Image (cartoon, rainbow, N blue to C red):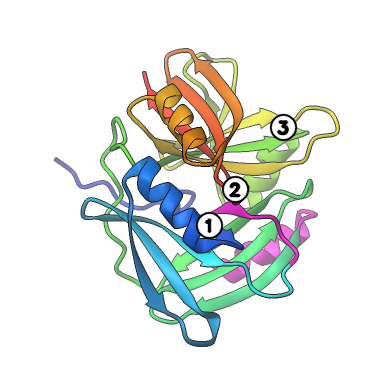
């Protein structure tokens, strides 16, 4: 069997920024079975790594003092060149919210906003990523998909094609648009409701979307969207953790 490789456009990391890391860690440990390990980052404080079994799945950090941003999950997407992606974002009408920066012994990243305000983090590793998960049903407790909610699907597809290098394809039902990395679908695009913000959402695979949603409420979270049935794909629920960060719960068909 050919080992699956990382391609530019694949999402390689998800990160929670919150004003209550301890409460969030407890919530996700109970909801998703994650274990956490802290890493001392000096003046930046502790960076927390979440694992499911023997696989590291994401991170969490305290919101830095003075940063005006909601508690939220962010997604890092692989690019060939972070500086070039930031430049292309500006040229395409977006903004660079955080200039390209090195993370010692990890890689280089930036934070860019598209023309409608959605944030994504172009990233390039300095080497040594674990291989991506094999194609097929994602393991329970691991991140598995992204959605871009945007007021202009066609223009957003063009923007991200230029900036990140995404290709485009059709959803299994044939009536929606997905981003692709190589030949792999990695995200879908959904039209935003009039007056609603544009944003990226991320999903974790669970055994049962509704059961996990109800458990999230018992653990102090809130329901954002109770259930969405996606033909030929599965079931989705959206919840907010006790600090307000939203997360999609995906039950494969």
User: Is disc 2 surrounded by few (<14), some (14 to 19) or many (20+) residues within 10 Å?
Assistant: some
Write the start and end of the magenta stretch as one range. Answer: 68-94
The residue at the far left in this view is: 1
Whether residue 182 appears in magenta in the rendering, the answer is no
Residue 79, magenta (yes or no): yes
Circle nearer the N terminus (3, 1): 1
Answer few, some or many: residues within 10 Å of disc 1's Cα (few below 14, many 20 plus, some between 14 and 19).
many
Say if 19 sits above or below 191 in the image.
below
Between 143 and 44, which is closer to the camera in this rendering?
Answer: 44
157 sits left or right of 35 in the view: right
The residue to which callout 3 is attached is: 154
Work out how far the residue at label 2 is from the one at label 3, CA to CA, in angstroms.
28 Å
Q: Quadrant of residue 240?
A: top right
Along the viewing direction, whichever of 102 and 240 lies nearer the viewer? 240
Q: Which residue corresponds to the image point at 77% horizontal and 33% vertical from the top-left?
A: 152
| Residue drawn at x 67%, y 35% as measured from the top left | 149
Determine the CA span between mark 3 and mark 1. 29 Å
Percent position (x, y) of residue 181?
46, 43
Q: Which residue is mark 1?
A: 16
Q: Residues within 10 Å of mark 3 (few under 14, many from 20)?
A: few
Residue under the image location 44 percent in, 82 percent down: 104
| Image quarter of residue 158 | top right
Q: Nearer the viewer, residue 36 or 58?
A: 36
104 w.r.t. 202: above or below: below
Residue most extreme to the bottom: 43
Say which residue label 2 marks. 245
**Mark 2 falls on what kind of element?**
loop
């Amino acid at each position: 069997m050919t080992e699956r490789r990382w391609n530019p456009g694949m999402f390689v990391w998800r990160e929670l920024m919150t004003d209550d890391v301890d409460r969030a860690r407890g919530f996700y440990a109970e909801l998703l079975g994650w274990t956490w390990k802290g890493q001392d980052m000096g003046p930046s404080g502790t960076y927390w790594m979440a694992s499911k079994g023997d696989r590291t799945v994401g991170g969490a950090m305290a919101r830095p003092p003075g940063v005006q941003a909601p508690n939220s999950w962010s997604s890092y997407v692989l690019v060939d060149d972070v500086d070039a992606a930031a430049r292309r974002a500006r040229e395409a009408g977006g903004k660079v919210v955080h200039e390209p920066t090195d993370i010692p012994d990890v890689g280089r990243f930036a934070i860019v906003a598209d023309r409608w305000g959605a944030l994504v983090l172009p990233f390039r590793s300095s080497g040594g990523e674990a291989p991506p998960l094999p194609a097929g049903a994602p393991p329970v407790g691991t991140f598995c998909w992204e959605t871009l909610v945007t007021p202009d699907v066609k223009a957003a597809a063009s923007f991200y094609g230029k900036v990140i290098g995404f290709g485009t394809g059709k959803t299994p039902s044939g009536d929606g648009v997905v981003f692709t990395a190589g030949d792999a679908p990695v995200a879908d695009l959904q039209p935003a409701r009039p007056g609603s913000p544009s944003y990226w959402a991320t999903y974790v695979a669970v055994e049962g979307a509704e059961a996990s949603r109800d458990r999230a409420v018992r653990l102090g979270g809130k329901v954002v969207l109770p259930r969405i049935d996606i033909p030929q794909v599965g079931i989705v629920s959206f919840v907010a953790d006790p600090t307000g960060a939203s997360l999609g719960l995906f039950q494969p068909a």
